[in-house]
Amino acid sequence: MTAIRTYIVEHDLGFAPNPFWGACTLAACKPLIRKAAAQGDVIIGTTAARHGRGRLTYWMRVEEILSFDEYWHDDRFRRKKPHLAGSKIQRYGDNIYYKGNEGSYVQVDSFHSKEGGICAEDNYQNDLGTTDKVLISKEFTYWGRLAPIIPDELGEFVLPGVGQKWNFSPQQVADFLGWLSVLGPQGVQGFPADW
C-alpha cells in the first residue's frame, strides 16, 4: 500500500525539495522522512505558517532512492550541483555531498555550508546523521508560492508544527490521492515562496 508522509516545508527556497531540472529531489533536511521512505511512497510538503498554513507546496511519488555519493556521481543530476554565482535555481542545487578519499562525506560549497564553503556541521549532521538516502521523482507537482489550499476534509494531512506524519488509514490515503489526481499538470508550476 502507498504510504503518504507529510511535513511542513519551513524554508521554501527550491533546495529541500529541489524541483528543478526535470526531477523533484529531497536530498537534504527531513532525515527521518528520507530514512523511512520507500519506492512508491508519496511525500507531501505543506506551507509554513507565514505563507498561510494549510496549502500544498509540493508532492512527489518516490521513484528512485540513491545514496548521496551515487547522486553526486550520476550524470542525470549534475545540474543539481550548486553554482553559487549562477541563477537562483543554480544556487539552491541540492547535490552537495560526495565521498572523499578517506570514505567520509564531503560537503561542497552550497546553501547548506558556511560562508567560504566551510562545512556547516549542524547541517551536515542533520543531513547525514541518520541516513544517506536521496529521494527522487519525476512524478511530482511543485507549486511553491502558488500552493493550492488543501480542502478541509483532508485537514489531517496538515501538521500543526514541526515533525512528520505517516499513519493514515487506507481511506485517507485514497482520498488524498484522489484529490491530487484532479489538481492539474505535474512539474514546476510556481517559484519558491521564499524567493
Image (spheres, helix red, strand yellow):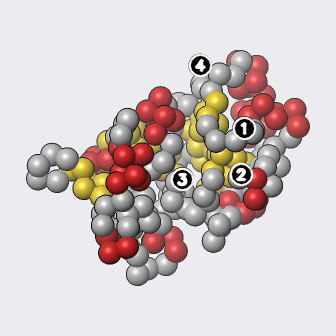
In the rendered image of this protein, does residue 94 appear above or below residue 194? Answer: above
Which label was assigned to residue 159? Answer: 1
Quadrant of image for the N terminus: top right
Image position of 114 (left or right of 137): left
Which amino acid, by three-letter code, is at mark 1? Leu
Residue at point 52% right, 48% down? Answer: 138
The percent position of residue 26, horizontal first and vertical second, equals 48, 48
Which amino acid, by three-letter code, is at mark 2? Thr
Q: Earlier in the sequence, mark 1 or mark 2?
A: 2
To which residue does mark 3 refer? 17
To which residue does mark 2 refer? 47
Quadrant of image for the C terminus: bottom right
| Residues at marks 2 and 3, CA–CA distance in whole angstroms | 12 Å
Which label was assigned to residue 57? Answer: none
| Residues at marks 1 and 2, CA–CA distance in whole angstroms | 10 Å
Question: Which dot, 1 or 4, sits closer to the camera?
Answer: 1
Mark 1 touches mark 4? (CB < 8 Å): no
To which residue does mark 4 refer? 1
> Circle 4: is it few (<14), some (14-19), or many (20+) Cα within 10 Å?
few
Q: Earlier in the sequence, mark 1 or mark 3?
A: 3
Which amino acid, by three-letter code, is at mark 3? Pro
In the rendered image of this protein, does residue 23 appear above or below residue 157? Answer: below
